[in-house]
Each structure stands twice: as structure tokens, then as C-alpha cells.
Image (cartoon, grey):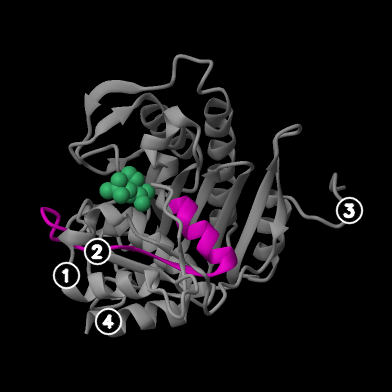
Amino acid sequence: MSRYKNIMTLDEFTIQQLRLFPHATGELSGLLRGIGLAAKQVNVEVNRAGLADILGAEGTINVQGEVVQKLDVYANNVFIDVLRSGINCAGIVSEENEEAVIFDDTRSNASKYVLLMDPIDGSGNIDVNISIGTIFSVYRRVSPTGQPATPEDFLQQGIKQVAAGYVIYGSSTMLVYATRRGVNGFTLDNSIGEFYLSHPDIRIPPHGKFYSFDNCYYHQVARGIRRYVDYCMSVADNKAGPYSNRYYGCMVADVHRNLLKGGIFFYPAVTGKPDGKLRLCYECNPMAFITEVAGGKATNGKERILDIQPKHIHQRSPLFIGSAEMVDEAQRFLR
Ligand code: P6P
């Protein structure tokens, strides 16, 4: 019986969803429950990061050339360990690992899914107690089960995703995930360590009041983007501009707020970053899948994110994502 009247837990919800597909094996439900378990373990450390020796830099530089935070390493290890010991995932691509982590044991090789993830998005916020997130993306393997996963399993177009989601470690901890059937949000009750369905069937408003862009790049972007930012901040008849700038330095937090309230997040190509900063496979694609299932849009400024054929697991992409009418509006300025 749920602790809260008529509110399902994540486990109950995934099992209920399973019943809608008589031929389903339950593997995807099991994988999602494993992700929930790993998220709870990471959440414990996030909540006490200021107390344990887990704040600050771990002292190495990751494949992206970024300073690795201790929590990055911890979260990466938790997700890999939980999913490797499960029976529903054949391997993982992570922002923290240069190569794919192929589990290659009998049980994992029999799994039909692989996972890509950014274990901690927004690491720079850890030491100042501002929201951070985890992003994940699930694909059905293209390689035969019974054998180890292959690199091709991880280089599929975003439209092939079976599920995608994120965890936001904020004023409360939420797990939000999408399948083709919809986007649902689960809030963690820390007192008993259970995720409860708090945001069923999330739909992104077609328009909103927020734009998320790091204004430090204003002079480092294409003219059309500068004109769009000018429009966002424009003052007509001495009234405030059409949008407020909300930029948390953590895409998960910005995209989550825009998903619930309406808005647009964009990280375009900037001087020195011709493909922007965000990674296609484990940041842009999962967020684009979630946003499109919720009724929004996501492009790289020219084409739909989900249509892009990845060439490398760590490749970057410019990203414009959020309310459909706002993404269309931004595209008009880009033209
Ligand atoms: P900048 C966090 O490092 C991240 O990948 C996104 O979550 C965030 O939106 C962006 O980078 C922040 O980058 O260049 O604005 O500091």
C-alpha cells in the first residue's frame, strides 16, 4: 500500500506500465528500477556532500578536458556497479569514460538494452549547493543478444531511444523519465527512500516566460542568435522584455523548469566551441526525447536533434530545446 493515498511508487508504476505490453519481458522496467536505485544511492552523497570528503575536485581531468569532481567519480561508479550487477543492461557509455564500458558477462550479454549517461551534470554547482543532475538514455541493442555489446549499439540516432530520463538533485530529488507512452515525474521521499509518482503525464507548455542562455557568450555567437537574445531582453513601451533569463549552469535544472513552466534553453556554437559544449549522445538526445514526448522541440539550429546520426560517443552539438513555439521563434531569428 502506498504511503501516500493513491500515489504509485516508481516500482509500482513501471510494473503497471509493463502490464500494458503483454509481450514485454520486464527488462526495461527492471532497468528503470535499477536506475532509481542508483539515483537513491547518489542522492545520499549529494545530500551530505558538504559533510563527507566528497566535495571539490578529484584531481584528474576527464575525456572532455574538464576538472573531475569527486561526486562525478562516485556517481559514475554507482551507476556502473548497480547496472553491471543487474540483468537488464549490456553496457554503458558515460561522460566520465573515454570508451564504452562493456559488461561482457553471461547475464549482461543476454540483456537487450544499453545505457548512455552523464552521471553528474552541472558539477560546478556541487560546492555551492545549487541543483545538479544525472541524465540517462536507453537503447535496444542492434548487436545480437548473447554476445557482448558493440560500439554500434551506442551510436544510434536519438529517435531510436526506448527511454530517456534525468534525476534532478534540487530542493527535492526527482526522477523524470519518458517512454513513447509519456513523461512521468517521481519525487523521492527521503524518509523511506521511495520515489512516488508526483508529476504524471508531464506536458510542456507551448510557450513560457523563461529563456536560458549564458549571456557571457553574447559576443561569441552568430548574429541571428544575438538578435534573438536582444528580442528576449527587448523592452517595449517600457514594459519588461517578453522573457526572463534563468540560467542555472546545470542544463538538467534549466530543462526541468522549462518542461514544467514553459521556456527555452539554448547552448549554441560559440567562439572556440564550433559544436557548442553539450554532448549529443548522453545530454542532447535524452533531453530532446523527453521534451518531444512532452510536446516540445529540440534542434541544433538546423535539424532535429533526434535525427542526427552520431559519429562518436562524445561528439558535441549545439542545442535549442523547450516549448515548441519558442524553439520555432528562435529558429526564425537564426534564419
Ligand atoms: P557554461 C554543465 O557543465 C553543462 O554541461 C550544462 O549542464 C550547463 O548548461 C552548461 O554546461 C554550462 O556551461 O559554459 O555556461 O558554464
Q: State yes or no: Cβ of the residue under disc 4 lies below 8 Å from any atom of ligand 1.
A: no
Q: From the image, which quarter does the C terminus lie in?
A: bottom left
Q: Earlier in the sequence, mark 1 or mark 2?
A: 1
Mark on residue 62? none
Residue on which disc 4 sits: 333
Q: Secondary structure at mark 1?
A: loop
Bounds of the magenta span?
252-274
Horizontally, is 197 left or right of 68 in the view? right
Task: Give the spatial CA distance, label 2 vs label 3.
Answer: 44 Å
Residue on which disc 3 sits: 5
In terms of image quadrants, where is residue 58? top left
**Residue at 71% across, 55% down:** 197
Q: Earlier in the sequence, mark 4 or mark 2?
A: 2
**Residue at 42% across, 21% down:** 55
Q: Secondary structure at mark 4?
A: helix
- x, y percentage for residue 133? 47, 44
- x, y percentage for residue 110? 42, 49
Q: Earlier in the sequence, mark 1 or mark 3?
A: 3
Task: Give the spatial CA distance, label 3 vs label 4.
Answer: 48 Å
